[in-house]
Amino acid sequence: MTEKSSNERIDYLKYKANKLPLLPGVYIMKNEKGEIIYIGKAKLLKNRVSQYFGSQKRHNEKVRRMVENVYDFDHILVASEYEALILECSLIKQNKPKYNILLKDDKGYKYIKITNDEWPKLKKALQRTEDGSTYIGPYISGFVVNESLDAALKIFKLPQCNKTFPVKTKGRPCLNYHMNQCGAPCAGKMTKTEYDQALSDAIEFLNGGTKEYLKILETKMQQYSDALEFEKAAEARDRINAIKRLTEKQKVVFSGNDTKDVFALARADEEICFNVLRFRDGQLTSSNNYFLELDESLENTRSEMLERFYESHGDVPKLIVIDGECENKELIVQWLTEKRGSKVEIIIPIKGRQAEVLSMSKNNAYEALAQRKAKSKADSAVIELSELLGLTKVPEYIESYDISHTAGSDPVGGMIVFKNGAPYKRGYRKFIIKDATPGDDLGAMREVLTRRFAHFNDDEFPRLPDLILMDGGDNQVNVALEVLRTYNLNIPVFGMVKDGKHKTRAITSSGEEIQISATRKVFTLVSGIQEEVHRYAISYHHKKHQKAAKESELTSVEGIGPKKAEALWREFKTLDNIKRADIDALSKVKGISIKDAVNLKRHFT
């Protein structure tokens, strides 16, 4: 059955869309008030626009919401698909429609403030205010402010604390002084004149930039040396070395002088976070995160991200690195090449230096998305796992199962739960295997899973898992899928595969292995789940096996059955205590007669 929109004008809109020509153009969706809510482009207008007003099952939540609010639409024909791209970008920039991707980065400091105090300080600031302070900026991002301010304070040995100078009572200098990162005016080790000069030099450094200020310093150092002012020359040399050390740290760990932008995304359900790293002359100059909704597909979302980003950023580099395919890649390259005035390349690296930088960007995206979803306790490793496995939603509740026995005897099953990436011990469950043939691990697993899912959503099992990880390969996965089909349940199931040293190696499904060793957080999470379910199952088995062994020694005594053995264990706790007890003490245990007590003493004497 086709799912239809509740929009009362859907039939009219579908009729109108089918009348569109098979030509390139831009379509403009409007709501009942005539407000533009979405702008798109198409190579063939009729085909593209009519898709919105057919079955809603093919659309994600964002597109369905947009369609619900469409009252009418306009279109503009153009000569080519490339012209449609140019026009679309221009119209989106002018109108900022609600359902288009509109980039808003994570908020950061944009200015460096020089306070209006007797001993002025350098601080971060979100905006200019009329407080008598002087401001440097605005900067591209909070990342640039943090890096620049941190460098200036350390190089010029300015205080990073909140103390107000001059202090009334001189105290002992802090650790920064001993690390040669502060002149310690609080301890009287830096005069006001020295402080003012350091501040002036720091401002010159911040205004001029690293390369320009290094040239100035190198010139000054030579001048001081020629004038035999060796102390000043040494100070200039130390500052040059400090600047070089700090800028080397900012260059990441890769060689080269690349100028490039790197785009990587993390996804949690319908929410996307793009991290954008901008490198200029091999140095990381900014790192920003942008949060948006999935726009039809990941390929389409990447395309939209690139278009919106470079529509508002005129600085287009020669190289753009992305983490997956994007729609209209050739058109976007053509557009960016025209904006830059020279050839632009978009690459998707698989290995090498560019892939390493892309991995760093992707890690930043996962971290930012996890922090944004902190209210729901989402863990970045779980978000990353869901993308690796191709899940439609982030698995908040993960169940894992394992079987344990000794040569087929005393078999048990263990079920553990990880909630938001952490063990949730209230959800753990133990199973005594009752029906499966001894030594038949798959039969034992079928029994455990049947008992678990026969009672889902009751007091014992209050909810279904979002993901099941089996301790084992495809055979265990197939047993789980078989049981789930019995109860008409659709839950993703994967196996956790170990190597020859019993260490987690990969995740498996349908005969294919998904390698996780290169993804540190996912590897840590999955190996942690596998170790925990194995520990839980085997510890329960050992406890049960030991108890059975002890009970079997007691039940071998004439007249002592399982119930009397259990009563003796409750009373004396250990087998040694039972052996040492006299007849009187033994006969006082409920259910143990004098005859039973005599038989026990004879057995253990």
Image (tube, rainbow, N blue to C red):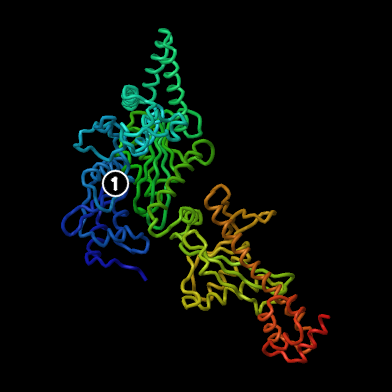
> Can residue 343 be seen by looking at this rendering?
no
Residue for point 33% across, 37% down: 163
**Quadrant of the rendered image containing residue 192:** top left
State the residue in front, 122 or 388.
Answer: 122
State the residue in front, 133 or 32.
Answer: 133
Residue 487 in the image: above or below residue 425:
below
Residue 519 in the image: above or below residue 409:
above
Q: Quadrant of the C terminus?
A: bottom right
Residue 17 in the image: above or below residue 130:
below
In the image: residue 499, left or right of residue 51: right
Q: Which amino acid, mark 1?
A: Pro
State the residue in front, 297 or 384.
Answer: 384
Residue 161 in the image: above or below residue 483:
above
State the residue in front, 549 or 331.
Answer: 549
| Residue lying farthest to the top in this orientation | 227
Residue for point 39% across, 10% down: 223
| Label 1 Cα neighbours within 10 Å, binned few <14 / some 14-19 / many ≥20 | many
| Residue lying farthest to the left in this orientation | 33
Q: Quadrant of the N terminus?
A: bottom left
Q: Secondary structure at mark 1?
A: loop
> Residue 66: image x %, image y %?
27, 58
> Residue 303: image x %, image y %?
36, 45
Per the image, the residue denoted by label 1 is 24
| Residue lying farthest to the front in this orientation | 169
> Residue 215: image x %, image y %?
39, 18
> Can residue 293 be seen by looking at this rendering?
yes
Residue for point 69% across, 54% down: 501
> Residue 39: image x %, image y %?
26, 50
Q: How many marks?
A: 1
